[in-house]
Image (spheres, rainbow, N blue to C red):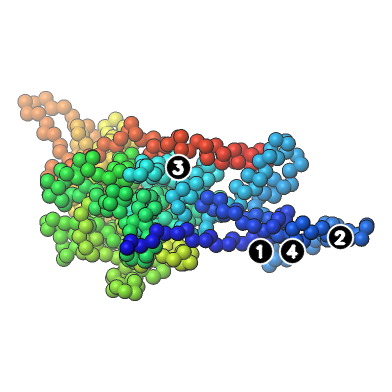
Amino acid sequence: MPPPKPTMHPPRRLQRRPPARVPCSQGKQAPVGPVRQSLAPPCTSRPGQIEHRPQGQLSQRQRRARTPRPPPSSSQAASEPQLSQPRLKSIAHSTEMPPALLLFLPLLFFASTWTLEFRYHNNREIEQYLLQVNASNPDITHLYSIGKSVRGQQLWVLALGASPHRHTVGIPEFKYVGNMHGNEVLGRVLLLQLIDDLVRGYRNNETWSLQLLNSTRIHILPTMNPDGFDEAGTHCQYSQGRFNHHGVDLNRNFPDAFASHRRRQFQTKEEKREAEVRAVIDWLKTETFVLSANLHGGALVVSYPYDNSNGGSELVDSASVTPDDDVFVHLAKVYSHNHASMHHGCEDSRPFLDGITNGYQWYPLEGGMQDYNYVWAQCLELTLEISCCKFPPPTELPALWTDNKMSLLAFMRQIHLGVKGRVMDGSGTPVENAVVEVEGRRNMCPFRTNQHGEYYRLLLPGNYTFTVTYPGHEVLTETLSIPYGPDQYSAMKHDFMLRRILPTTGPTPAKPYQANPAPAKPTPTCNYTLQLGQELEGGGVMTEPTLRAPVMGICLVALLRSLID
């Protein structure tokens, strides 16, 4: 018989606010969506009980009010919980507010005390949480949908950064994708906690968060397979829910550069791909992603491309090696070495050397997402296997977050490896589709500039020779000395200035220059043209009817808060 469907685990209790600071109630806690609201502390008397005292005698609360409190010691001040600034202001100025605003005070009170819990949130709860974060932080977040699952559930992405609504020239695009397999669920939890940490750190002016969000635009897709999660069992290894609603493994459904010609023709047909896969492919056409990772479970290792091979020159010592293998190995080690125990592996299997592996060397995989990102979208993507158990017990979630937190942050900083810049034509205008190649790195699909004329190349420190080609211009060759950029949160900046080919006056016309005239086989169909007509704010399609009602309510809370302040 199939494993039982997952049940929602009871949420953990949150630490209460100081009893002396807020009015009392019965001390109940009510869950609201994906968060919990901390209500007032319990009253000193039982419900309905009246406190009797002699006439003229002051109550305990009145005596406390008349007795001046001594200033707290430094140790007490450091350990005593404080009310948030918005709540202090709302209480202090409550008598000055217009009467109509008093009706919304409970909503304002609850909105200021929302806290993300360590538990498994269902898809609706994740949506509510993302809506709340987006409405409360419109200056650094932007929520958009890249499409729908087979059953019509939105695939929500939250973009975070100093300019979250659209791409900024010089700011690289990063993404995390979770829950590609519906029963591998830890990624959902970690990505929500990552959002919470990034936003809180930015609001608290913490240097690490300010530097990251000011230098990078981060896109987080908590669940790529919400339908699979709805069907997932809670068994550690063997349970249903891996596939989407059509019973398809999404990590076997992408076009594959190593597939046979007939198989590749089948894969490139739009109707043959699942809705979730089509959504991701279209997403990659709207943004120039530079670095990415997708989060899985059931093992403890970082896997890097290639996942497949056809036995050609890429096959080296049982590994399928990319032209950027040194960069991939470095990126994988960054995550593994910052993890608490990844290099030890799981108890029931041998550990991987340094906690990393080449995908094909581990096991061949056709139609994988990380190979598609690298070959077709010039985005370096890794697969993060982050837990030995696919559906870890809820009690282990805080520790698993601690194990992965530093790795998630350190990996994002690696987007600043190498060099970035623009390619300018003879008149100084940035040009799209200029080929930017690095000597010794013959990619199946050469890296090209985007619609802003930008290029990004993740490279380790060293000297590299670049060749830049663009129709009607001379081939440009330059050698650059590239430093290590992540510590400064910026890759090296360098613009390539092209020169136009002068018209010839003789009978022999100028021979046109061809970019990468003889690419290595197999040769996938490389389509570099971004879908400019679909490049909306955030890189996706916002579904207005779904968002309007909850967003208006949360925005009203933000408006009230600003009026009170």
- Residue 413, compared with residue 278, is above or below; it is below
Separation of marks 4 and 3 at Cα, in angstroms? 43 Å
Separation of marks 1 and 4 at Cα, in angstroms? 9 Å
Local SS, label 3: strand
Would you call the spot at circle 2 few (<14 residues within 10 Å), some (14-19), or many (20 or more)? few
- Is residue 38 visible in this depiction of the protein? yes
Foreground residue, 196 or 53?
Answer: 53
Q: Which residue is mark 2?
A: 52
Badge nearest the viewer, 1 or 2: 2
Where the C terminus falls, by quadrant? Answer: top right
Earlier-in-chain disc, 2 versus 3: 2
Residue at far right of view: 56
User: Residue at 74% of width from left, 47% of height from top?
Assistant: 92
Would you call the spot at circle 1 few (<14 residues within 10 Å), some (14-19), or many (20 or more)? few
Local SS, label 4: loop
- Residue 96, compared with residue 479, is above or below; it is above
Q: Which residue is mark 4?
A: 72
Residue 165: image x %, image y %? 44, 39
Kindly indicate whether the residue at mark 3 contacts the one at mark 1 (C-beta within 8 angstroms).
no
Tag on residue 443?
none
User: Residue at 56% of width from left, 41% of height from top?
Assistant: 554
Kindly indicate whether the residue at mark 4 contacts the one at mark 2 (C-beta within 8 angstroms).
no
Local SS, label 1: helix
Badge nearest the viewer, 1 or 3: 3
